[in-house]
């Protein structure tokens, strides 16, 4: 059981106390005074490992199933004895320019908080340290934990959005560069970026509903003075989602511009091919006519016929070249 419990502590009057030991005794101790709560953090527990925790805190079976299986959309669900919130933190990997998402499940109830983490993109140690350094915030009980986690997740959305913005600006510059880069490689980069933005949207956009509910205060187990804090998180989330929408529109515009450039380049290539084919057709036609070996042909026995024909072909080809060059076909 200790392998999956990353950390656990009782917080009384905004300050951490000793290791609670047995969860049942710790929860009873927290509830006895009324000014304390127990926070238990777990990382990717199995069903057997989570059974003890879910039984001690009387967690709803449906919420427990969601917490174990993961792969949930961000949401907020209210049960008789607890509040269940799903968050999807995102992680940006600069080496591969890849966005990945983890999952955080938060259970809040009478004098307890249980957090379940899936993936490496959602470390909570920094959040716990930040809260423990702010006793005034921790005095608000389990709500302060939910706020701090939500705030950290959403603030990181803004950081990842900024990183993606830089990547997309570089991609846009490459697309509009004179060389244009490799057409296949550029298209692949655009579609890869599209997938990263889509992954980001799946994590951030569905969170708008839960944050709106928390900001109104119409949710049980949430401190009545927490509304301004969740409104601040909601505002940051709105900025993040707007940035994601902007990135998606930018990618669509870049893709359209890239496809248009490819069409223009293909037209240019076809014009050049047509021009060269026209220039090659004239000497081919003349040479074909005089290569038919008829006995009676004009100028066949004339001494200057060969240089005259060569000069004629060279003159026509030169004239065509200048014409195509002037029209931008060459």
Image (cartoon, grey):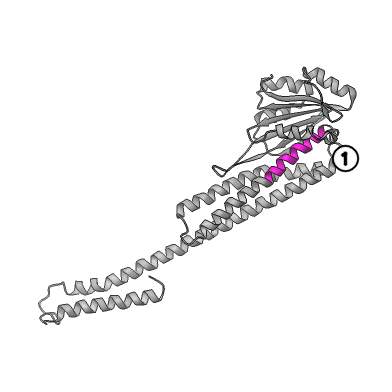
**What secondary structure is found at the residue carrying circle 1?**
helix
* Residue at the outermost right position: 33
Q: Residue at x 89, y 22 (%)?
A: 32
Is residue 78 visible to the viewer in this orientation of the structure?
no
In the rendering, at what x and y percent does residue 252 appear?
A: 58, 56
Q: Residue at x 43, y 65 (%)?
A: 267
**Residue 143 part of the magenta segment:** yes
**Residue 276 part of the magenta segment:** no
Position of residue 299 relative to residue 238, above or below, is below
Q: Residues within 10 Å of mark 1 (few under 14, many from 20)?
A: few
Q: Which residue is mark 1?
A: 225
Position of residue 282 relative to residue 228, above or below, is below
In the rendering, at what x and y percent does residue 95 appear?
A: 54, 42
Q: Residue at x 88, y 39 (%)?
A: 224
- 84 to the left or right of 14: left
* Residue at the outermost front position: 133
Q: Quadrant location of the N terminus? A: top right
Q: Chief secondary structure of the magenta span? A: helix
- Residue 322 vs residue 309, the one in the foreground: 322
Position of residue 135 relative to residue 200, above or below, is above
Is residue 263 visible to the viewer in this orientation of the structure?
yes
Number of numbered discs:
1
Q: Quadrant location of the C terminus? A: bottom left
In the rendering, at what x and y percent does residue 197 appear?
A: 61, 47
In the rendering, at what x and y percent does residue 153 appear?
A: 71, 40
Q: Residue at x 17, y 74 (%)?
A: 290
- First to last magenta residue range: 142-157
Q: Quadrant of residue 20?
A: top right
- 44 to the left or right of 291: right
Q: Quadrant of residue 17?
A: top right
């Amino acid at each position: 059981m200790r392998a999956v419990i990353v950390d656990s502590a009782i917080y009384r009057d905004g300050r951490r106390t000793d290791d609670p030991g047995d969860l049942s005794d710790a929860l009873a101790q927290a509830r006895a005074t009324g000014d304390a709560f127990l926070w238990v953090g777990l990382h990717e527990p199995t069903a057997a490992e989570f059974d003890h925790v879910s039984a001690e805190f009387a967690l709803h079976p449906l919420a427990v199933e969601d917490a174990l299986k993961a792969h949930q959309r961000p949401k907020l669900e209210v049960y008789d004895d607890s509040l269940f919130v799903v968050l999807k933190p995102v992680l940006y990997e600069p080496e591969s320019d890849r966005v990945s998402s983890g999952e955080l499940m938060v259970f809040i109830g009478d004098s307890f908080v249980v957090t379940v983490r899936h993936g490496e993109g959602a470390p909570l140690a920094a959040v716990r340290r930040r809260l423990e350094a702010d006793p005034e915030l921790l005095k608000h009980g389990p709500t302060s934990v939910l706020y701090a986690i939500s705030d950290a997740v959403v603030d990181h959305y803004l950081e990842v959005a900024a990183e993606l913005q830089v990547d997309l600006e570089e991609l846009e510059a490459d697309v509009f560069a004179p060389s244009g880069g490799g057409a296949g490689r550029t298209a692949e980069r655009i579609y890869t970026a599209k997938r990263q933005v889509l992954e980001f949207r799946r994590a951030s956009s569905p969170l708008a509903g839960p944050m709106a509910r928390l900001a109104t205060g119409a949710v049980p187990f949430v401190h009545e003075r927490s509304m301004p804090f969740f409104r601040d998180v909601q505002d940051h989330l709105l900025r993040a989602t707007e940035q994601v929408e902007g990135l998606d529109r930018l990618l669509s515009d870049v893709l359209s511009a890239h496809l248009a450039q490819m069409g223009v380049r293909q037209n240019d290539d076809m014009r050049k091919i047509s021009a060269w084919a026209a220039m090659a057709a004239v000497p081919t036609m003349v040479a074909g006519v005089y290569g038919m070996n008829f006995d009676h042909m004009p100028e066949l026995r004339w001494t200057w016929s060969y240089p005259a024909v060569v000069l004629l072909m060279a003159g026509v080809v030169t004239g065509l070249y200048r014409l195509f060059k002037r029209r931008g076909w060459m």
